Image (cartoon, rainbow, N blue to C red):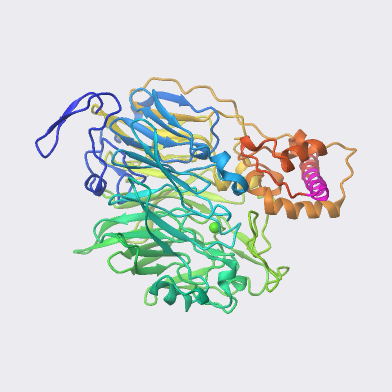
Amino acid sequence: MNGTCRWFATGVLACAMQAGSAANAVDDSTLSAVGDGSDWPAFGRNYSEQRYSPLTEINTDTVARLGVEWVMDLPGDRSLVATPLVVDGVIYFTGSFSKTRAVEAKTGKLLWEYDPQAIEHAGDRLRIMWDQNKGPAVWGDKLIISTIDGRLVGLNRHTGEKVWETMTIDPRRAYYITGAPKVFKGKVIIGNGGTEQEAARGYVTAYDADTGEQAWRFWVVPGNPADGFENEAMEMAAKTWTGEWWKHGGGGNTWHGITYDPEFDQVLIGTGNGSPWNQKIRSPEGGDNLFLCSIVALDADTGEYKWHYQTVPGETWDYNSNMDIVLADLKYGDQTVKALMHAPKNGFFYVINRENGELLSAEKLGKVTWASHVDLKTGRPVETAGARYEDGEELVWPSPFGTHSWHAMSYNPNTGLVYIPTIEMPAVWKDDKVDFTAWQPPHFFVNVGVEFGTEDTPADYGEAFLVAWDPIKGEKVWKHELPPQWNPGTMTTAGNLVFEGRADGKFVAYHAGTGEILWTIDLGHGISAPPVTYSVDGRQYVSLLVGWGGAGLIAGTLAAQHGWKYGVHPRRLYTFALDGDAAVPPSPPPAWATPVDPKDFVIDDALAGYGQHIYAQSCFLCHGGGAVSGGNAPDLRESPIVLSKAALHDVVVNGAKRMNGMPRFKHFTDRELDALMHYVRKMARKASTAVAANP
Ligand code: CA
């Protein structure tokens, strides 16, 4: 509504003085309502996290006319996974390493940008890979962003000037932030990740949204009982742990799923997996290990515990409950339940009464073998024999990618359906070679307490689907096969549409009721972010960030098959409207690595084996399983740097590529660098032998 006047319900005529000044407030009342759809002011559009827009100009009849209105190139960006926010015709979004931009929605004109210099602040945290950031929050005139190095930064959203900055973690520990901050009642809340690289103890912290001053903190798992408990909830939780769990941190880190519930004035947090993953190390005599893998309801003003529901008691498969928590009124007969819906990694779709945490239903969303079902009387999963790899190696569905990861699901109150991107693939679990008693937690490298597979993942190992789910009946209504395996979040509208990008670069609109594909455009690069919709001067727009990225890219060939090779394809912000007639700008064709195999390089198998161990701890999160890059970082099998000991030393030990995001490992010895070289050469030779056999 820039440069225009409008009447408010109070009878006041407000006029925006200049482009960029606000007419629409962003506060508790706007974020509690569906509104007129002109803004997309919060991560899940409003407090409900439904990602539902009431706009109807783009609908099942008109969507065929949808076209590109404008495109903004984002040179320098890599992973783009954020939900852009739109207020008063201004788009706000975070790119790689939380670089933040404000853009005029009608034209794509850049209004301001802010770089929090996350690489400079990150230090060893760069080893945790993720340059991704899931987006900003708006409260009043503030835009609040999070950074991988653990900060929250409050900006003036009209100018991009920094107003406050708060460090939310102990920077000496391997905690990090990739999640979007969430706002409620003048506060902003954030959690963190770290269970794979640290003796991590999860927590969330609420701050004053205008000043950054801490309001309250809630710890997810208990600390050492000898130090005393922070509250009664921690005392209760400690009874569900065994051994000396605090030495391993315990985990439960809340790196995503946080929803404010205005009707019960509570904050619902979705908590993480154990630190380490393997419960035999973390809590050797078993126990439920509260509040891992749970939804915990907290008093919004004080952060005090209200109730919880645990999806995976005593978890041991990285089956965290960090996925989005969506609020809706669901009708069972003539009874309306204030429900929350949640599809965590473990493969079940949960409906829970959010007044008290009572489980209403839990049905399988895809192939799940770790549990046969969830007992509705006890609320507990019924596990299958062998699933805890207690009898040795076990193949279990789903994998640590989860049946549903953080890619947002959306809920359309008109169809009553939830639209969820799913992944169906198994993982092999074994811990025969892990010494439980001698095990030490990691510190800025990966060690999860199982023999973790860092081999390549074959191209056909995982399937992916877009599922339309009836939460009341607990069943699929329609589904579409998607390209493997890492597809982004969905958005749904009163125009009876569902929008979703895809791993293969296509952006698709579906009929929300039937699943019929009504519109498709090829954007020439893998999509990892969810779309948003809004209107300016009465015209409806759809915006989408395009930049392949995120943790799914560690899956080697499975992720690399689409050809989104590191550094090849331009990153962009697209905006669409009816009769938009701009062209999709050119993008290079899919590209794959060409492994280099100097025949005179004599591979020492023992050294390569040691190199694989180092690679698994410190390299594969970015460079990919089996040294096959899924696109997050260069494919080392073709890198000239790995062919030269001096160059490798310069990059790995001296940090020569630090500003590209390549962390420094200054403790690596010559033997370790040699071992890495031998491992990478072995993987390159394997690839060129395979090509020679199957040209
Ligand atoms: Ca995890």
Q: Nearer the viewer, residue 511 or 533?
A: 533
Residue 364 occupies quadrant: bottom left
Residue 208 placed where, x, y %?
34, 50
Q: Is residue 106 above or below residue 177?
A: above
Point 88% across, 37% down: residue: 599
Point 61% across, 29% down: residue: 568
Is residue 519 inside the magenta stretch? Answer: no
Quadrant of ligand 1: it is bottom right
Q: Nearer the viewer, residue 560 or 124?
A: 124
Whether residue 691 is visible here, answered yes or no, is no
- Residue 602 vs residue 591: left or right? right
Locate the C terminus by quadrant: top right
Whether residue 310 is visible here, answered yes or no, is yes
Residue 206 occupies quadrant: bottom left
Magenta residues span 669-682
- Residue 152 vs residue 78: left or right? left
Residue 316 placed where, x, y %?
56, 67
Q: How would you classify the magenta stretch by its main secondary structure?
A: helix
Residue 671 placed where, x, y %?
83, 50
How many dots with numbers?
0
Residue 543 placed where, x, y %?
38, 33
Q: Nearer the viewer, residue 497 or 134?
A: 134
Q: Nearer the viewer, residue 145 or 475?
A: 145
Point 65% across, 54% down: residue: 445
Q: Is residue 23 above or below residue 470?
A: above
Q: Residue furthest left?
A: 11
- Residue 625 vs residue 15: left or right? right
Locate the N terminus by quadrant: top left
